[in-house]
Amino acid sequence: QVQLVESGGGLVQAGGSLRLSCAASGQTFSTYVLGWFHQAPGKEREQVAAVSRNGDNTNYAGSVKGRFTASKNSAKNMVYQQMNSLRPVDTNVYYCAADADSSCGIAFIPRLYDYWGQGTQVTVSS
C-alpha cells in the first residue's frame, strides 16, 4: 500500500514557475513508476509526465515538453515536477500516481496506476 500526498500548488502569473512535490509512504517506492497527471473541470484526467523506477528516464506530454521536468528521489520517497513558463492553459488540479507493477515503464497508460494522491490546484493567471 502506498499513500501519496502532493503539495506545492498555488497561484502564479503566466510565465512563472512552480515546483510540485509528492511525498510517498511505502517501503517499495523505489520500484514504482511515478506519474503526474492533470485534470480540468469537466474533463478527463490526462497524464503529463512519467518517471522510471530508477529515476533515470522520463516521458512527457507534448503540451509540457521542454517546460516541465519530473524527477524522483527514492531515498526520500519523493517525486517532483518542476513547472516553468507556465501558461493559463496549465491551470488544473495536478495529481501524482504510482504504478506498482511498472511492467510498461514510462509509457502513458493511466489505467495501470494503482495509487493516487489527493491533488493540488495550480492556477495560472494571464
Image (cartoon, rainbow, N blue to C red):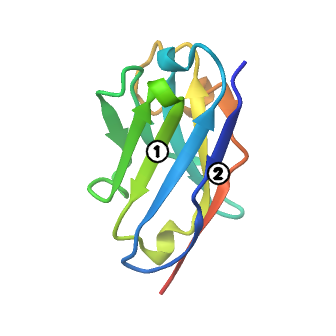
Query: Residue at position x 54%, y 48% from top?
Result: 21
Residue farthest to the front, as pictured: 76
Q: Is residue 6 left or right of residue 50?
A: right
Query: Residue at position x 52%, y 53% from top?
Result: 20
- Whether residue 109 appears in this view of the structure is no
Residue of label 2: 44
The tally of labels here is: 2
How far across and down, in percent of the image, does residue 79 sit? Answer: 49, 38
Residue 3 against residue 44 in the figure, above or below: above
How far across and down, in percent of the image, does residue 122 sit? Answer: 58, 66
Q: Is residue 82 left or right of residue 31?
A: left
Query: Residue at position x 63%, y 47% from top?
Result: 6
How far across and down, in percent of the image, does residue 52 sit? Answer: 39, 25
Crowding at mark 2 (Cα within 10 Å: few <14, some 14-19, many 20+): few
- Whether residue 52 appears in this view of the structure is yes
Q: Which element carries disc 1, helix, strand or loop?
A: strand
Crowding at mark 1 (Cα within 10 Å: few <14, some 14-19, many 20+): many
Residue 126 against residue 86 in the figure, above or below: below
Which residue occupies the foreground of this view, 29 or 100? 29
Q: Amino acid at mark 1?
A: Tyr
Residue farthest to the bottom, as pictured: 126
**Which numbered disc, 2 or 1, marks the residue that appears first in the sequence?**
2
Q: Which element carries disc 2, helix, strand or loop?
A: loop
Which residue occupies the foreground of this view, 43 or 57? 57
Residue 60's label in the rendered image is: none
Which residue occupies the foreground of this view, 72 or 119? 72
Residue 56 against residue 21 in the figure, above or below: above
Which residue occupies the foreground of this view, 44 or 11? 11
Q: Quadrant of the N terminus?
A: top right
Query: Residue at position x 36%, y 27% from top?
Result: 55
Residue of label 1: 80
